[in-house]
Amino acid sequence: MRIDQLATGVVMFLTAVVSGAQQGEQAHPFYECGLYPEWSELTAERGAADMRSGMKLAKERLSKIRELKPEDLNYENVFAAFENAPREMERVEGYLDTLSSTMDSEELRRVQEKLLPETTLFNASITADEKLWSVIKTAAAAPWVKQLSSEKRRYVQQVVDMFRDSGADLNAEQKTRFAQILSELSTLTHQFDKNVLDATNSWQWVVSDPSQLAGMSEQWLQRAQADAQKAGYGTLEKPKWLITLHEPSAFEVIRCCDVEATRKKCWEALSSVGREAPYDNAGIVARVMELRKEMATLLGFDSFADLTLAHRMAGSGQRAMNFVDDMMKKVKPAYDDEVAQLLDFISESTGSKMDKLNPWDTSYYMRKLAKKRFSFDTELLRPYQECNRVLKGMFSIFEKLYSIRIEEQPVRYAGQTAPVARDAVPVWHPEVRAFVVRDADSGVHLGSFFMDLFPRSTKRGGAWVQPLDYGEPATGGRPHTPHLAVLVGNLSPATEGKPALFSHYDVETVFHEFGHMMHCILGNTELRSHCGTSVTWDFVELPSQMNENWTWEPESVRTYAVHYQTGESIPEDYLQKMQKMRFFFPAYEDMNQLCIAKLDMEMHTHYAEKFRGKKLDAATRELLAPWKAAYSCETPSIMRTLTHCISGGYAAGYYSYKWSEVLAADVFTRFLKEGILNPAVGADYREQILSRGDSKPAGELYRNFMGRDPNPDALLQKQGLMK
């Protein structure tokens, strides 16, 4: 049983086993399968049945642990059995989460809404079970624990910590209240996600006048025109253009459109998500914060931040807060200077003196200023960043570094009319691709992964990697069985007559997520619970943040940057200008992210003092006023849409992004010193970081690779903000 699953009372998404070629229907398709699941059989109704079936199996296994006598306790029948108890539930949860986040439907929503109270109650009941807790405590104190491997001893302690942090030592009345809190939180966070997605889907703008879209790229215009026709608007002769709030549609408008009114309308629409009835999330955010504070108090912690960070690298809410505040202070002078430069440029460009920023203008004029300063527009990179070329180049980089082979597989999907290969891998949508990863030296199948890269109305925004199943650990000289994961994005899709041409942000995104993927696929730990991204949240972004470096270094960029029509390599002057532009206005980007981290940490530490009884937007502006630039209008609180911190794993943990970015900047100095494509460094990184998962404390893994503790100023030094 994963240690981080029950601490919040929600079954996390970490597993889903594998299935193979075409087969008959399974009795339990969500967890009785071979290498890959038959996605066409994974209906909402079957998911509900399989979750309840898995829950029944878990209860039976836990009951066996509960009935053990003290003299019969050992690692296998207590801790190994506990780890394995909810295996089927985890698989069902993983598949349901993948489907709901990529193929959203009313049926899936109804099923998840019905299952949430049941699974939450089940999880809460585990740590509330005094008899089970008694067995766990007795076993953890037994002399034989000292004879276990270091990884198993670590797991034993993690199980004990998880029980205590989940209320196992509470009295009966407190346990009842704790379970009620978990149940209400599950319902609230699920509704929060629904509101964000429904509000995003509820807005669209059909543009008939092309002059309103001046400045937009030909690729964007073609895509918007195709989207409009697909939705029933316009014709080839009389085109119209559809703008939505799905990435990258309205986001590109705000960044590139020359017409201020158009940019403003899109910004206002994006700002309305989670803000207007019936999708207003302010009340949900307030209630979530109150419940999390109550939960922390019940468990003896001063704040939810302290509860959350007790077993992470930061160790406490105060240490994480100090990290954020210290970085903000160091960045603030450069941030103020960059804002002043931007305001001067806007004033010069518009002929009107500006002393406040229009929020719909910042990214637009920042792009124009960069273009003027460096005589370069990053849109020029698109023809050299065709999707398949980028993927092929990215794979080749990490194949060399980690001594692996990545092979694409034929796929099949429901309703397919084209001939199907006999060994085709089942997928849930025609755009989904499947890959196998093998060790280059031994040929061992390490794992497989799916890629679902392009936006659609049934997919939630953003990009992420989700582990679906960690294979059985290596035993008796046999390697571990293959892992399975999925990489999801909302990147620039193909347009009529052109393939998918990525922006540099798209390229960074796919490299970032592939860092998470390598963390999943290259995991090789003694226990499944410690594999891959099972690490603490303030360490999990290290592999992904570090991967972004290879999208900037000329040596690695050349592996994929080839013109999609001519086959010519990216011009050398483009590479040089990219290097110069990389840290254009770095303090502005840093401060934006630090402000989110500050908001998250303050809400989970001092909600009563700084937010209770106040309007969410006003309280957010008041908190961040000393750090943020002055805007010409009131802006909404990002917490209205920040699924990371409300329904995701980053509650009191958004600082992790900057924390991990510091670690990643420091780690990459070794690659810079010894060679960014040096297989020896890559092999050491694979062995010391990627393969180890959570088998050792994160700080120890870090020191094993770097030979020292992290340099806290590594990121600011890399950005040129510190010497």
Image (cartoon, helix red, strand yellow):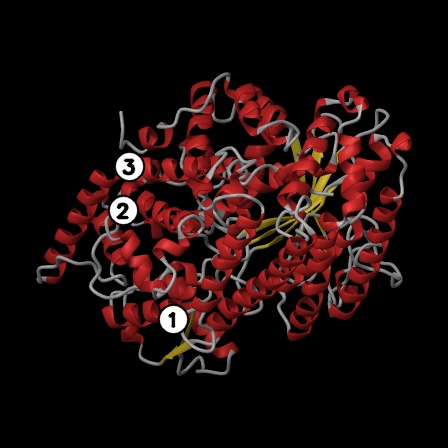
Give how far across and how far down residue 577 sits, in percent. Answer: 29, 39
Give how far across and how far down residue 601 sits, in percent. Answer: 42, 47
* Residue at x-position 51% and y-position 72%: 198
Q: Are marks 3 and 2 in contact (CB under 8 Å)?
A: no
Q: Earlier in the sequence, mark 1 or mark 2?
A: 1
Give how far across and how far down residue 694 sits, in percent. Answer: 63, 33
Residue wearing tag 2: 376
Residue 489 occupies quadrant = bottom right
Residue type at mark 3: give it: Lys
Q: Secondary structure at mark 3?
A: helix
Labels 1, 2: front one: 1
Residue wearing tag 1: 272
Residue type at mark 2: give it: Phe
Residue type at mark 1: give it: Ser
Q: CA distance from mark 3 to mark 1?
A: 36 Å
* Residue at x-position 50% and y-position 34%: 315
Residue wearing tag 3: 580
Residue 150 occupies quadrant = top right
Horizontal relation, residue 685 to residue 235: left or right: right
